[in-house]
Image (spheres, rainbow, N blue to C red):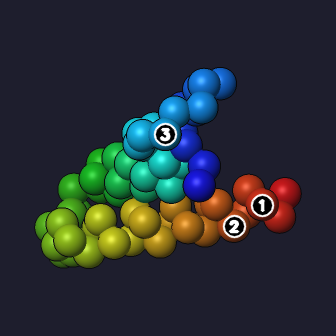
Amino acid sequence: MKYAFPTSLDFSFDQGMTLRDYFAAKAMQALLTDSEWRRVVGMNEIALFAYKMADEMLKARVTE
């Protein structure tokens, strides 16, 4: 699993936000700026779409 803000230390506990979560948060931030789209689509759908976008960003990152 990739983390958004990894440390060089090897901790055995949760290291926080994953790269997928970080990408989804950035995608959601952009999606929420479109007030018209926000009125048409529910918040749950926006969250799901943000994670789909994050998954695509991760795929693109690997094939780069």
Q: How far apart are marks 1 and 2 (CA)?
A: 5 Å
Residue occupying image coordinates x 43% and y 52%: 21
Q: Which residue lies furthest to the top in this view?
A: 8
44 on left or right of 17: left
Instruction: Give coordinates of residue 18: x percent, y percent.
Output: 48, 48
Residue occupying image coordinates x 60% and y 25%: 9
* Quadrant in which residue 41 is drawn: bottom left
- Element type at mark 3: loop
Residue highlighted by disc 3: 12
Task: Pick whichever, 18 or 13, lies toward us.
Answer: 13
- The reply to whether callout 1 and callout 3 are in contact (CB within 8 Å) is no
Q: Distance between the residues labelled 2 and 3?
A: 27 Å
* Quadrant in which residue 61 is drawn: bottom right
Task: Pick whichever, 12 or 16, lies toward us.
Answer: 12
Question: Disc 2 marks which amino acid?
Answer: Lys
32 on left or right of 6: left
Instruction: Give coordinates of residue 62: x percent, y percent.
Output: 78, 60
Q: In the rendered structure, which disc, 1 or 3, sits on the residue that comes first in sequence?
A: 3
Is the N terminus in the top left, top right, bottom left or bottom right quadrant? bottom right
- The reply to whether callout 1 and callout 2 are in contact (CB within 8 Å) is yes
Establish if 9 lies above or below 26.
above
For the image, the number of numbered tags is: 3
- Element type at mark 2: helix
Residue highlighted by disc 1: 62
